[in-house]
Every structure is written in C-alpha cells, then in structure tokens.
Image (cartoon, grey):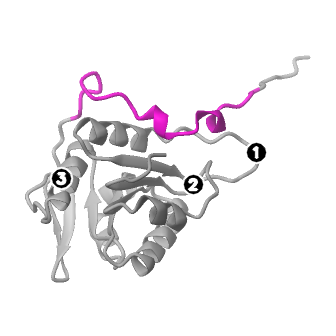
Amino acid sequence: MNDKADILLINPFSWIRDGSPAYLPYGVLYLAGYLRGKGIKADIFDANTDYSDPLDVVASKKPLAIGLSVLTGPVINEALKISRAAKMRFKDIKIIWGGLHPTLFPKYVLAEASVDYIVQAEGENALFRLMDSLLKGHVDASILNFGYKDNGRIFINPVDERLIDLNLSPMPAWDLLDMPRYIANRFFASRVL
C-alpha cells in the first residue's frame, strides 16, 4: 500500500475464512488504476485477505474519502460496520458506496446516515469527477452515475448507460495488492467407476 491516499478503496469482508483463496477484487483494482491514471492517489484495502482493522488503515492513510465496493447480500453488514465506525472516528471523512447494491438501491443506501455519496453502474468517471471536485473543496452535483444528499434531501443523477472501453483504460492497479494472498494450489479430482 502507498503511504498516503486521497481515497482508500475498501473491498469489505465477504467470504468465509476457511482457507480458500480470496477472489481478486477486480472492481477496486480497475477503479484504482483509473484514478491513478488521472492523478488521484488511490489505495486498496481488501478485508478478505488483510485481517487488519480497516479503521487503522484509514488512520494511517489519512484519505479524504473511503470508497466501499458493496454487493447486495451479507457484505452490506460489513460495509455498514466500516462506514459507521469510520464516520464516528473520522468526522470529516467522506464515505462513498459503489457497486451493485447502491446501483440497485440508491435511495435506500443514501438514507443511511454514514453514507455521503454513491456511485452507480460504471463508476470510473463518476468517482474521478467526485474525487477531483472534493480535492478542490466542493462537490460537482452534475456528475452522472452519482447520488448525494443536500440538507437531508436525496438526489440521484441519471445513469450514463455507456460502457467504458477497458482497452483504453489504464491497467488495474495490481501493485496495490499482496498477490501471493490470492494464489492457491487448486486440486480438482473425481472418481469414475
């Protein structure tokens, strides 16, 4: 991980620690690569392979924002724990949720007091524009694929249906992960009579 980050992208704990290898968090890998390509200092914390306290990592990185990649399902509880604890400990930090859950249920997610912003669907450009505006001291309310709160009211901007051409995007930020944690010997076998 880098020393300091503008944003810490967190992949919340989402699987059983039974010795099985974790899956690579491709979403946050691509987001970090895209943001770095645009000059935003991004780092990744994957709670599925790093058993450190996420708040200790936030304290060491001192990011302006944390972004959580949230699927619909049990991972929501982990994301809520991190978001709520981060808001209590770091009052000024911005909490951004992205991924499937905020894409499907944007108003529900923004109704959560600890969540400041959501990024829906293809998140690369929306997250870059949000981070760029936050670093400049304001929020650009016109960002597509973006939701926010203003004086208790929830606003959900239109979703840009265009897909990002991954051939034109920066490579995923592989260097931000401890890759041996994702490699395992797999053995498949079957018995045949």
Residue, far top: 193
The residue that mark 2 highlights is 47
The residue that mark 1 highlights is 19
The residue that mark 3 highlights is 132
Q: Quadrant of residue 170?
A: top left
Q: Residue at left 44%, top 78%?
A: 89
* Foreground residue among 83 and 175: 175
In which quadrant will I find the C terminus? top right
Disc 2 residue type (three-letter) = Ala
Main secondary structure along the magenta-highlighted residues: loop
Q: Along the polypeptide, which appears first: circle 1 or circle 2? A: 1
Q: Quadrant of residue 186?
A: top right
Q: Quadrant of residue 122?
A: top left
Expressed as whole percent of the image width and height from the top left, the position of residue 23 reads 58, 39
* Foreground residue among 36 and 117: 36
Q: Label 1 to label 2, Cα distance in Å?
A: 14 Å
Depth check, mark 2 against mark 3: the one in front is 3
Q: Give the structural element (helix, strand or loop) at label 1.
A: loop
